[in-house]
Image (cartoon, rainbow, N blue to C red):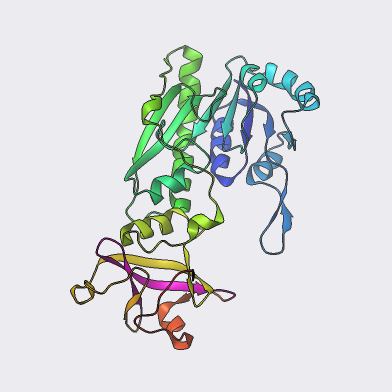
Amino acid sequence: MKLIFMGTPEFAVPILRALLVAGHSIIAVFTQPDRPVGRRQVITPPPVKVFAAAHGIPVHQPEKIRTPDARAQIEPMFAGCDAAVVAAYGRILPGWMLSAPRMGCINVHSSLLPKYRGAAPINWAIARGETETGVTIMQMDEGLDTGPMLLQRRTPIGEEETAPELTARLAQIGADLITETLRLLERGEITPIQQDNTVATHAPILKREDGETDWTMRAEEIVNRLRGFTPFPGCFTFLEDERLEILRANAEPLSIEHGDECVPGAIIEITKDSFSVCCGAGSQLRILEVQPAGKRPMLVRDFLNGARIGCGVQLGRKR
């Protein structure tokens, strides 16, 4: 097939690579503009641009795609291809773009639609304690991940699997699934299935404040958010008004001796290598690795050498 590919982050690279390996002709790649990255704000090209350029594929990085000028430049290109394959491009596409290719625009979405529609499906699936997820290949319409489903593949989520680890696995699943989808579409062997909107859930874009720990949650929920919100927005709390990143922790049942007087957010136990914090629903979080504000990541045994904390100290933002 003659294809246009639209994608931006590392997740999209294996999918683009699989299309090339399968023998499809990629006439153009659309990706987000180069952006400042890191503390030094170094202008950095997106991973998809780097891969496409290395393989001699023309790259387009429009700042806007909903202006008359953008449409005049882009629409003829889309009208001249069989389909556009979209994988984490980062923008909602206008109607004219969706309908221009002969077979429309086909999205590689990293969830079991209709669950987790939106910008961060992998993160929220982990954060909300799901034990299974997958990839859905979808015919795009003008809604937010609401189009008919073409193929879907499931995979379990590991008990300790983090968002970056799951992202890498789902990217490969998506790569295999999109090539299968295109092959079946060429043969006319796929019947699109409409999504059941009554069971849809949303996976909104992550915000920095999502990472702040709510100590009234169960410790298991906090650990799930830690896994799902790695590397951004992370999982953090406050110790004497200083931000403290939690990098590694385990959920445990609350020790019996602390049951009656336990206040969520209070440090209730300190050992040589860890400290435990009271959480909701009779649970506690044993913290093993942290990163204090302005310092490097460190094991709790090293953190305790310089930190003035004791049992009863309350973590969290002062109200």
Note whether residue 15 is visible: yes
Residue 31, image x and y in percent? Answer: 67, 38
Left or right position of 10 against 245:
right
In the figure, residue 269 lies in which quadrant? bottom left
Q: Nearer the viewer, residue 288 or 213?
A: 213
Front in this rendered view, residue 99 or 82: 99
Can residue 232 be seen in the rendering of this structure? no
Q: Position of residue 221 (x, y in %)?
A: 34, 56
Q: Position of residue 23 (x, y in %)?
A: 58, 26
Q: Quadrant for the N terminus, please.
A: top right
Q: Main secondary structure of the magenta part?
A: strand
The residue lying furthest to the front in this view is 319
Q: Vertical placement of 201 versus 298: above or below?
A: above
**Residue 304 included in the magenta stretch of the image:** no
Stretch in magenta = 273-294
Residue 254, placed above or below residue 61 = below
Residue located 34% across and 84% down the image: 272
Q: Is residue 292 magenta?
A: yes
Q: Which residue is at a point 31% across and 45% down the rendered structure image? A: 131
Q: Residue furthest top?
A: 188
Residue 64's image quarter? top right
Q: Residue at x 57, y 38 (%)?
A: 88
